[in-house]
């Protein structure tokens, strides 16, 4: 991680001081992300900006992330890079009851009682959410092939044919 970003931050002190941190981290250091990506080559650039919206009276941290995640395309099974550019404003709350008072464009971030946050946890959470359920390369060819049933299945009688014959008798 970058030298100017501390491992732990006191969220409320950072809001009061309106601090901003810019950093970068190798993808290899983000352990929860490792099972979701093809490999851990590359780095992630991020910025954390703490502040307080005086009109809405909401303390927040704005997280900006810019990276490319190496994923495996599920069509071609080839590695590709998914560009990820995220800007997320997280409303800092002390308990879950405060979540309902956040504006709609804020995501809630429950701050522990001691007020300490790990910046890398915030970055890693957003990257995990950015990984698609089924990664597909934009350059990958779509599979547009008709699969005909084998001849032996075509010749078999339908299991519902007997029911249809009984229905016709009634």
Image: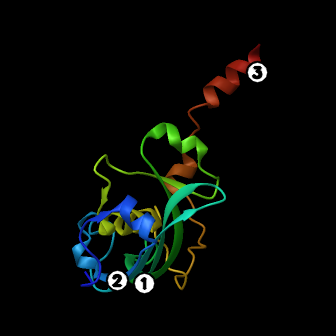
- Residue 142's quadrant in the figure? bottom right
Q: How is the model colour-coded?
A: rainbow
In the foreground, 99 or 55: 55
Q: Which residue is mark 3?
A: 168
Q: CA distance from mark 3 to mark 2?
A: 74 Å
Figure check: 32 above or below 4: above
Q: Are marks 1 and 2 in contact (CB under 8 Å)?
A: no
Quick check: can you spot residue 131?
A: no
Comparing labels 3 and 2, the label whose residue is closer to the camera: 2
The residue at the point 64 percent across, 52 percent down is 103
As drawn, the label of residue 23 is 2
Q: Is residue 75 left or right of residue 112?
A: right
- Residue 159 percent coordinates (x, y): 56, 33
Figure check: 169 above or below 121: above
Q: Which residue is mark 1?
A: 81
In the foreground, 117 or 133: 117
- Residue 33's quadrant in the figure? bottom left
- Residue 170 percent coordinates (x, y): 77, 13
Q: CA distance from mark 1 to mark 3?
A: 59 Å
In the foreground, 153 or 113: 113
- Residue lying furthest front: 16
Q: Are marks 3 and 2 in contact (CB under 8 Å)?
A: no
The residue at the point 57 percent across, 57 percent down is 106
């Amino acid at each position: 991680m970058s030298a100017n970003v501390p491992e732990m931050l006191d969220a409320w002190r950072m809001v009061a001081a309106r601090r901003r941190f810019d950093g970068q981290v190798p993808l290899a250091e983000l352990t929860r992300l490792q099972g979701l990506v093809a490999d851990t080559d590359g780095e992630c650039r991020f910025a954390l900006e703490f502040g307080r919206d005086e009109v809405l009276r909401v303390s927040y941290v704005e997280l900006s992330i810019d990276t490319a995640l190496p994923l495996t395309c599920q069509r071609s099974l080839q590695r590709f890079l998914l560009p990820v550019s995220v800007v997320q404003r997280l409303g800092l709350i002390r308990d879950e009851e405060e979540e309902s008072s956040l504006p709609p464009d804020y995501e809630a971030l429950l701050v522990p009682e001691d007020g300490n946050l790990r910046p890398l946890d915030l970055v890693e959470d957003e990257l995990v959410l950015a990984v698609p359920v089924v990664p597909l390369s934009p350059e990958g060819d779509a599979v547009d092939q008709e699969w005909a049933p084998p001849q032996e299945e075509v010749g078999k009688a339908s299991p519902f044919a007997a029911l249809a014959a009984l229905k016709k008798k009634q």
